[in-house]
């Protein structure tokens, strides 16, 4: 929350991307979140990622539900499309939008309340369908808008601001996504843009649903001693197990010979991700290995971060449903709506 | 002081308790020789508090009304706004607003005590330097005597600056404030001997007699028609004293300094119809301020570049023209500008004014008076204390190191007054009071500050000018009309309030990145401090390529032991970093420089009774 809008003046040596836009052109309205909210940093990382990718703002759609996190779609890419849906229903609205127009880039922003409580089933089925979208969960472990009650992602033993510990087990969106077949799963931290921005870029380039769980501290209700989602706790327990570099299409991919742990995953659009693991037995392209490793970290009280799993062969919803190559709006009307005769013959097939 | 980075080791944390750091952030105040508190006086104008604004100005520059019209404005090229868009804040003309709209200030002026301290000071010349010394010393109980060869105070401000730029009434007021404190004025009294002045028993002598001699140009024909060739500043003085009231129709001015600008515009008012200002070099090398060039061109003065004077063409005892080498300038291998003569040309004219600079002249200082001179005939004067080799004799203004401008003379006057006070109180003149500062939070409440932090994108206001016909009819008609109230309201809001500092308290930082994300001009970075400054400057959110601007480096941050770095270059002082900071690690604080001033020695209770 600020008293004034961000001044339109910018640094005189600000660079432009391939579209001739500066990073300021990817900003949105002024945030009304609390000063120091992790979500604002996620927004800033998204702005940077979209600018670096030279994403045309008018070809993107920002999708959200209800909650502090879901407000943030107003704070970036003001020229983009947007849909602020009912609580927890962002995944299904995005599924519908993506079905109708597969040519837009879908950026879904949700929170631990929106996605892990009321919208848990929605999220699970969007993952199963592999809707081609970026799915960001701003995860702070509390319901900030209703003054700091524990959310479904709160860890056992994590203390509320009043000092009461949480006793229910948390839902880990990363493990859940891996269990139900997600093709791109990452975890990051709002306070670490060096890690977060390349992951967001990779996620935006992924063909399918890219789930990114971002630990994004609630500075008002969950940044105290005893919280397991505070800035300090996250910094002390964050263990980056996979370092990801996003390599755009134009860049030549040169693998360092000596580093056997570097894996290159080719993306659908021709770009690539270079993954560098810090654990010798970790394979971020192997689902079982990823699950085992993240679970082991969890037991040790560590927060495994990085691009934890990626499937380069991902088939999204449209591939599976064999839908037309273009957006429905671009189909000739005769094809989109073949008329009563065609409907009759279709119906006859089921008689 | 030049900025010199250590190229071998990482930077040390910035010490903001040293007033120099935050002072330098206030670019205008740093650039002003007298360190006028520009942002504070602009805020007072914004609040309609013109009298207070004028008085704040007067503390530093003594002549706000004069300088609001004539200052060379070192503050404006320094203005941070000029680095964000083309034009700086119109600082100088806002100063005039405060001067024009002030109410009677006499009740707020310092007064001289009834009981004097027994020290007598002689000031030579009643120009800006001497008057500043008098202004600073009179309230401390000094008896001040000013020797002036003319019959009015002001020096070059009166006789060399035309009244269409500076009305006499403005000058009268501001000289009067000082003189009425009780200076003894000896008008019509040129000092002819320093020795006899010292023999009168003065405890100190301050020489602020200016650089009164205009340079001559010895070329063929120079003395063949002397009545038609004038020396710039002498001619302006003669116009002032009404010894000269007309000039021939076609006038050539040699030189492109500010004196040349005053000469050409005065000539237009004395009947000249075709006025050409001729320069040896191209426009980029002109000495005149750009706005004075613009004003001259508005008055249909033609500026001729790359012409070197060769001879004056005289026929039958009268000037018919001036011959020039037309030059072409090229850079040679060593990067120096070299000229070649392309052709020779004659500019027809009836009168010539030479405005190619001024020189000092001290025929009245005996060479055995203890004041030593260098090979160029200039007195040897200490740059800080203004003391000459005779410990009782001090120099300031153009008399010290050659021609500068009024604001420098004022700055010299303040420093010389400190020295004279110290010397008269039996202290070493090098024992100067240090600068100080106050730093106070301007936070009123959550996201509420005691200054207007919103950025105004308005463009610089254009000064209104009197119509040409009216100007040329009346020599004393002031050209600049001042800003309208609407223009004032807009122009004051262009100021970025650089004296409201972004103050950082490292132990409070939780490294949430909020300040970095919100900063509109990419000033902030959290990074590791592992490399020297030149490398660090490249690693910031936006590379800090302006080496004249400092970068601030915090102590290690609590959580990751990285550091907060701020590039001061294009900070808007909008306060958004502080508004977005959840722990108030960033705060906006009003910086006020406490300038050293004469009297500090006496204030410490060490007044020496005579």
Image: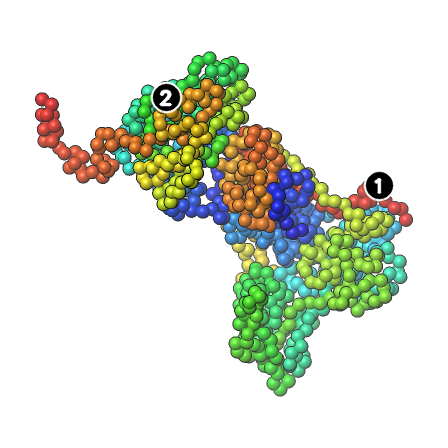
Dot 1: element: loop
Q: Residue B190 lies in what quarter of the image?
A: bottom right
Q: Chain of mark 2?
A: A
B217 to the left or right of A5 = right
Q: Nearer the viewer, residue B151 or B145?
A: B145
**Residue at 74% in and 67% down:** B376
Dot 2: element: helix
**Percent of width and height locating residue B151:** 76, 64
Label 2 crowding class (10 Å Cα cut-off): few <14, some 14-19, many 20+? some
**Percent of width and height locating residue A181:** 32, 24
Q: Residue A279 lies in what quarter of the image?
A: top left
The mark lying in front, picked from 2 and 1, is 2
Q: Which mark is residue B605?
A: 1
**Residue at 61% in and 72% down:** B254
Check contact, mark 2 vs mark 1: CB within 8 A: no
Label 1 crowding class (10 Å Cα cut-off): few <14, some 14-19, many 20+? few
Dots 2 and 1 on the same chain: no
**Residue at 44% in and 13% down:** A168
**Res. B564 in view:** no
**Percent of width and height locating residue A196:** 44, 33
Depicted B364 relative to depicted A156: above or below? below
**Percent of width and height locating residue B196:** 87, 64
Q: CA distance from mark 2 to mark 1?
A: 79 Å
Q: Which residue is mark 2?
A: A176
Q: Nearer the viewer, residue A110 or B260?
A: A110
Q: Chain of mark 1?
A: B
Q: Residue A201 lies in what quarter of the image?
A: top left
**Res. B534 in view:** yes
């Amino acid at each position: 929350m600020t008293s004034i809008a961000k001044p339109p003046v910018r640094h005189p040596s600000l660079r432009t991307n391939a579209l001739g836009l500066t990073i300021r052109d990817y900003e949105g309205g002024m945030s009304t979140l609390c000063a120091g909210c992790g979500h604002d940093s996620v927004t800033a990382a998204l702005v940077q990622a979209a600018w670096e990718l030279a994403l045309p703002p008018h070809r993107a759609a920002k999708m959200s539900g209800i909650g502090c996190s879901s407000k943030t779609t107003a704070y970036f890419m003001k020229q983009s499309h947007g849909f602020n849906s009912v609580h927890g229903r962002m995944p299904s609205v995005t599924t519908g939008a993506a079905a109708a127009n597969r040519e837009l880039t879908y950026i879904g922003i949700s929170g631990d309340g929106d996605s892990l409580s009321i919208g848990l089933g929605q999220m699970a089925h969007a993952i199963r369908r592999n809707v081609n979208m970026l799915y960001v969960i701003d995860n702070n472990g509390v319901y900030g808008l209703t003054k700091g009650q524990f959310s479904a992602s709160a860890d056992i033993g994590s203390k509320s601001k009043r000092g009461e510990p949480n006793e229910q087990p948390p839902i880990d969106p990363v493990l859940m996504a891996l269990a139900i077949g997600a093709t791109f799963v990452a975890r990051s931290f709002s306070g670490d843009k060096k890690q977060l921005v390349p992951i967001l870029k990779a996620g935006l380039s992924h063909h399918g649903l890219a789930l990114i769980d971002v630990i994004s501290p609630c500075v008002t209700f969950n940044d105290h001693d005893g919280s397991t989602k505070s800035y300090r706790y996250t910094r002390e327990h964050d263990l980056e197990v996979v370092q990801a570099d996003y390599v755009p299409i134009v860049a030549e991919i040169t693998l360092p010979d000596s580093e056997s742990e570097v894996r290159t995953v080719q993306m659908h659009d021709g770009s690539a991700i270079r993954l560098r693991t810090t654990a010798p037995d970790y394979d971020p392209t192997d689902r079982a290995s990823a699950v085992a490793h993240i679970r082991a970290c969890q037991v040790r009280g560590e927060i495994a971060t990085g691009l934890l799993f990626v499937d380069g062969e991902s088939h999204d919803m449209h591939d599976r449903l064999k839908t037309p190559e273009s957006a429905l709006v671009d189909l000739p009307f005769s094809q989109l709506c073949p008329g009563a005769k065609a409907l009759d013959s279709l119906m006859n097939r089921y008689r | 002081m030049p900025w010199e980075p250590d190229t071998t080791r990482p930077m040390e944390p910035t010490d903001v308790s040293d007033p120099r750091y935050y002072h330098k952030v206030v670019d205008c105040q740093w650039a002003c020789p007298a360190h006028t508190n520009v942002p504070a006086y602009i805020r007072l104008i914004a609040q309609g508090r013109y009298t207070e604004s004028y008085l704040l100005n007067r503390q530093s520059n003594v002549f706000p009304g004069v300088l609001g019209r004539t200052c060379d404005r070192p503050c404006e090229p320094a203005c941070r706004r000029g680095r964000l868009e083309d034009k700086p804040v119109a600082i100088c003309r806002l100063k005039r607003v405060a001067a024009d709209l002030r109410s009677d200030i006499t009740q707020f002026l310092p007064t001289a005590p009834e009981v004097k301290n027994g020290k007598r000071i002689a000031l030579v010349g009643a120009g800006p330097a001497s008057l500043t010394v008098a202004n600073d010393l009179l309230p401390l109980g000094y008896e001040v005597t000013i020797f002036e060869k003319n019959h009015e105070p002001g020096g070059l401000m009166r006789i060399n600056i035309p009244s269409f730029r500076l009305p006499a009434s403005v000058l009268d007021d501001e000289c009067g404030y000082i003189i009425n404190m009780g200076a003894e004025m000896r008008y019509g009294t040129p000092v002819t001997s320093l020795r006899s002045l010292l023999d009168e028993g003065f405890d100190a002598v301050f020489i602020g007699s200016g650089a009164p001699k205009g340079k001559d140009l010895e070329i063929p024909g120079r003395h063949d028609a002397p009545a038609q060739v004038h020396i710039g500043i002498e001619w302006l003085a003669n116009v002032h004293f009404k010894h000269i009231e007309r000039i021939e129709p076609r006038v050539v001015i040699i030189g492109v300094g500010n004196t040349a600008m005053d000469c050409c515009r005065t000539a237009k008012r004395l009947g000249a119809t075709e006025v050409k200002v001729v320069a040896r070099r191209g426009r980029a090398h002109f000495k005149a301020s750009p706005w004075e060039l613009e004003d001259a061109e508005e008055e249909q003065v033609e500026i001729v570049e790359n012409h070197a004077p060769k001879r004056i063409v005289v026929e039958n005892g009268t000037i018919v023209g001036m011959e020039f080498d037309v030059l072409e300038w090229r850079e040679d291998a060593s990067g120096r500008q070299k000229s070649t003569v392309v052709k020779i040309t004659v500019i027809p004219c009836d009168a010539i004014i030479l405005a190619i600079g001024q020189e000092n002249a001290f025929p009245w200082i005996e060479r055995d008076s203890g004041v030593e001179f260098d090979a160029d005939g200039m007195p040897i004067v200490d740059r800080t204390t203004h003391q000459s080799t005779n410990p009782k004799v001090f120099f300031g203004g153009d008399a010290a190191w050659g021609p500068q401008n009024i604001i420098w003379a004022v700055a010299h006057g303040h420093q010389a007054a400190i020295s004279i006070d110290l010397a008269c109180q039996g202290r070493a003149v090098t024992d100067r009071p240090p600068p100080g500062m106050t730093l106070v939070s301007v936070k009123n409440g959550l996201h509420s500050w005691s200054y207007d932090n919103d950025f105004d994108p308005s463009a610089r206001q254009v000064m209104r000018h009197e119509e040409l016909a009216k100007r040329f009819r009346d020599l004393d008609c002031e050209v600049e009309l001042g800003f309208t109230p609407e223009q004032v309201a807009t122009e004051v809001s262009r100021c970025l309030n650089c004296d409201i500092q972004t103050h950082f308290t490292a132990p409070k930082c939780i490294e949430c990145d909020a300040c970095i994300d919100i900063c509109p001009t990419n000033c902030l970075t959290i990074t590791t401090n592992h490399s020297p400054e030149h490398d660090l400057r490249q690693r910031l959110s936006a590379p800090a390529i302006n080496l004249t601007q400092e970068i601030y480096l915090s102590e290690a941050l609590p959580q990751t032991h990285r550091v907060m770095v701020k590039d001061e270059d294009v900070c808007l002082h909008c306060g958004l970093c502080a508004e977005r900071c959840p722990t108030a690690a960033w705060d906006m604080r009003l910086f006020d420089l406490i300038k050293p001033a004469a009297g500090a020695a006496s204030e410490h209770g060490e007044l020496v009774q005579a």
